[in-house]
Amino acid sequence: MRSLSHERLSPKKEKLFVILISIYLFFLGVHRGGTQFVIADISDLYALGAEGIGLFASVQHIPPLFAPLTAGIIADRIGKKPLVTAFIFVFALGCVICGFSSSLTVFIIGMFIFALGSTVSEMMSTATLSDANVEKSFQYINISQFMFSMGAVVGPLLAEFFIKNAGADWRFPFSLGFLLFVIMGAVLLFTSFPGVPARAVSSEAAGAHDKKVSGIRNIFSFVTPFILCLAIAMMIYIGMETGYGNFIDSVMRAKNATSTISAFTLSAFWGGMAISRLVFSIISYRPGRMLRLCFAGCAILLAAIIIIPGGILSIIISAGIGFAYGPIWCTIEAVAAASSEGRSGSAIGFMSIASGLGGIIIPSLIGFAAKNNVQTSLIVLAIASAVGFILCLRIKSK
């Protein structure tokens, strides 16, 4: 037999590693929620309207089309620590460029760079959690995403507070992001990461395999029909999450809600997601069944929030939408990593391609559809959720 070496962390180092990755994802969530809260202001600044919100969302999902898969293939060979830490600093650089930008072109360049850094660092961080302990991968990924969601709860409220009380503007989330990511990148440089996971292959089978397949085909040999189905579900989900997060503030404004109600509606979404991910990190569940229930719940709740006025009930329903969204991403990532036969970085990278496509296509459709009526954005999301439910009828629990 031949296998790649896999350095297991000691229980103490494993626990510390999971805590630090979760803290990083919390900071990433603060940045994500904060930027989603000010994205409408940025769009208004450059006179782009609802289409501008869709444009900004799409730009952020270009890097997932190529960067994480490339990084994942490299990481499966040299380890994930160099890529995670390097791209956290790339993330910080993008925040600086956005924060100091004075033109739309410079801002979009900065957005592309921070999206490149955030995408690779988040995806590779998630893959390392599976590497640290495959048996606990569902738990670890859900816990880390719980922290991400909690950060996204804090982000809009923090931005709204400093904008109202300290004279800050839309640049605040980028300034804060730069500070947090520089600190976190430095901390992770001195943190032990798990090694590349082992994958055993008989020498005879490996020799025959090497003769029959080309290098490119070998790279993508982990893409089974099951992985492909998960990728399509991921594409739909990311479009839903990005679309809701970026458009709900504009929808609430169209409903004549106050800025406080608007901020709490977005925070409630992330809060519901955080609670959901915490719950699903504790309980056992069947992935296929859970995905079907969550997509169906999203469609129903999105339809509900469309027809009600912008008030306290919107906040409650938004929390319900977040709860339904909660475990979808974590489950798809964990199942993909566990089904990759030791190539978690590549599998997570492939999921990122699907994420990029979903984040570009669906927000763009929303921006076009919502040009004359921003509430149409939620109709597109409800339809996407229904399609996700139909797709998951084909996903069998593993």
Image (cartoon, grey):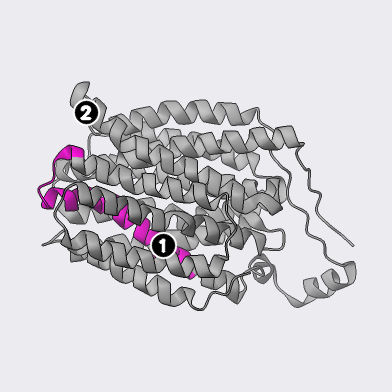
Q: Residue furthest top?
A: 166
In the picture, residue 46 is in which quadrant?
top left
The residue that label 2 is drawn on is 163
> What kind of residue is marked 1?
Tyr
Q: Is 297 drawn above or below residue 321 in the view shown? A: below
- Is residue 216 something one can see in this rendering? yes
Q: Position of residue 161 (x, y in %)?
A: 25, 28
Question: In the rendered structure, which disc, 2 or 1, sits on the residue that comes first in sequence?
Answer: 2
Q: Is 66 drawn above or below residue 178 in the view shown? A: below
What residue do we see at 30% from left, 57% from top?
243
> What kind of residue is marked 2?
Ile
What residue do we see at 34% from left, 69% from top?
384
Q: Position of residue 241 (x, y in %)?
A: 36, 56
- Is residue 99 something one can see in this rendering? no
Q: Position of residue 149 (x, y in %)?
A: 43, 44
The residue that label 1 is drawn on is 237
Distance between mark 2 and mark 1 Cα atoms = 31 Å
The foreground one among 208 and 126 is: 126
What residue do we see at 58% from left, 66% from top?
286
In the picture, residue 32 is in which quadrant?
top left
Q: What element does badge 2 sit on?
A: helix
What residue do we see at 41% from left, 46% from top?
115
Q: Quadrant of the N terminus?
A: bottom right
The answer to whether residue 118 is magenta is no
Please give left or right for residue 17 compared with residue 311 in the image: right
Q: Magenta span covers which residues? A: 232-260
Crowd rating for badge 2 (residues with CA inside 10 Å; few <14, some 14–19, many 20+): some
The answer to whether residue 235 is magenta is yes
Counting labels gives 2
